[in-house]
Each structure stands twice: as structure tokens, then as C-alpha cells.
Image (tube, rainbow, N blue to C red):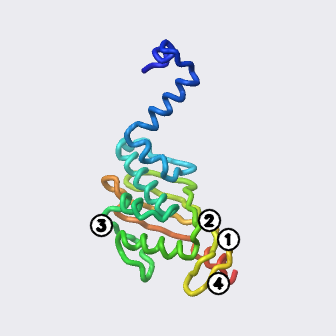
Amino acid sequence: MSLAILCRHGLDKARWVVVCLLAISAAPGFAETDHLVQPQTLIVDQSLPKAQLSAQVLAARRYDTFWNTGDEAHARAALDPNFIDKTLPPGRAQGVAGPIAASKAFRGAVPDIQCSVEQMIVAGDRVVAHLHFTGHFTGQFKGMQGHGQTVDFIATDIYRVVNGRIVENWHLEDNLTFLQQIGAVTK
């Protein structure tokens, strides 16, 4: 319905805005994604087909929301069943099980961990996410008991997305800063 038609039916502009917002939030797909983390800055290759761009951003937002919440459903929705971690840390399982186990272990050390997306860059079949993690070390990490130390570090992930799922990931976390903040290594 156009604004003119809504106004003829007795809706002023303020009510029309509410009607539009309700219609948008009820639109297919919108309610499904409004709970996902939003990048603070989104830079996209405008030559990408809109459907591909949307699918890549959705996969990245799902995976980044997994790191923010620890909800495995987001990881499983984002990652291809044949997902490969191209920078697999020693001792971590390959495939979808790897990041899920890593998240559980990290949340055991920093239960209130939050992950925000400072910026996201989409080009070709890649999405680069600049992540910012914050929280407090109140749990346990490799035999160390936390005492509420502040945790604040960054990570960068490069996702290769095919058919709306992340098939490969290259990642680099600022582990040195994390280890210094919790007192595992000296500055």
C-alpha cells in the first residue's frame, strides 16, 4: 500500500512508519536475521550479484554470531559440512567440530565473552571479518584459574563462501595479547 492510500485510510505519517516497520519485520528472512551480529562497517564489491552478496554476508554473520553467543546452531548453519580450517591450531579437530570445541573451551575460560564485528569486507567468494573480543577471565584456562581479568583482543578471519556456506577459513587471533591479559605470559 502506498503512503497516499494509507493516508486516505486515516493513517498519518507516524502510524504509516509503524505499519511499514511491522511489515518489514514480518517479511520473510528479516526476522530470521535481526538477531545476528551486525558489522559496524560493511564494505562490499558492488559487482557481486545481490543473491551471492546476501548469502555470503548471511553466512559470515551467522558464524560471527556463533562466536558471540556460543550457540552451535549458528555455526552449523554457517559452516559447510565439509568445512576446512586452513590455519588449524595444534590439537583442534578439523571440520565443524573444531570451532565448536574451541568455542566451548574459550567460554570455559571467559564465560561472558562478547564478539563484535568491527568491519566486514566482501569481495569475490571471500568475506574478511575483523572481530573484537571482550570479556573477563573468570573460568579456567590450561590449569589457570581466572580472577576477573579483563580480556580485550582482536582476530581476523577470511571465509571462503560457496552456496551460502563457509567452506574454508583462515584466521589469526591476537593470542599473545590474550595470554598477557590473563597472566599466562609476561609483557
Element class at badge 1: strand
- Which quadrant holds residue 133? bottom right
Residue 129 spot, x, y in % from top left: 50, 58
Q: CA distance from mark 3 to mark 1?
A: 36 Å
Residue 58 spot, x, y in % from top left: 41, 51
Marking on residue 47: none
In the shown orientation, is residue 89 left or right of residue 79? right
Where does label 1 land, which residue? Answer: 150
Q: Are marks 1 and 2 in contact (CB under 8 Å)?
A: yes
Element class at badge 2: strand
Residue 93 spot, x, y in % from top left: 38, 77
Residue located 39% across and 43% down the image = 29
Residue 178 spot, x, y in % from top left: 61, 74
Q: Are marks 1 and 4 in contact (CB under 8 Å)?
A: no
Where does label 4 land, which residue? Answer: 185
Where does label 2 land, which residue? Answer: 134
Which residue is nearer to you in this view: 110 or 184? Answer: 110
Mark 3, other Cα within 10 Å: few <14 / some 14–19 / many ≥20: few
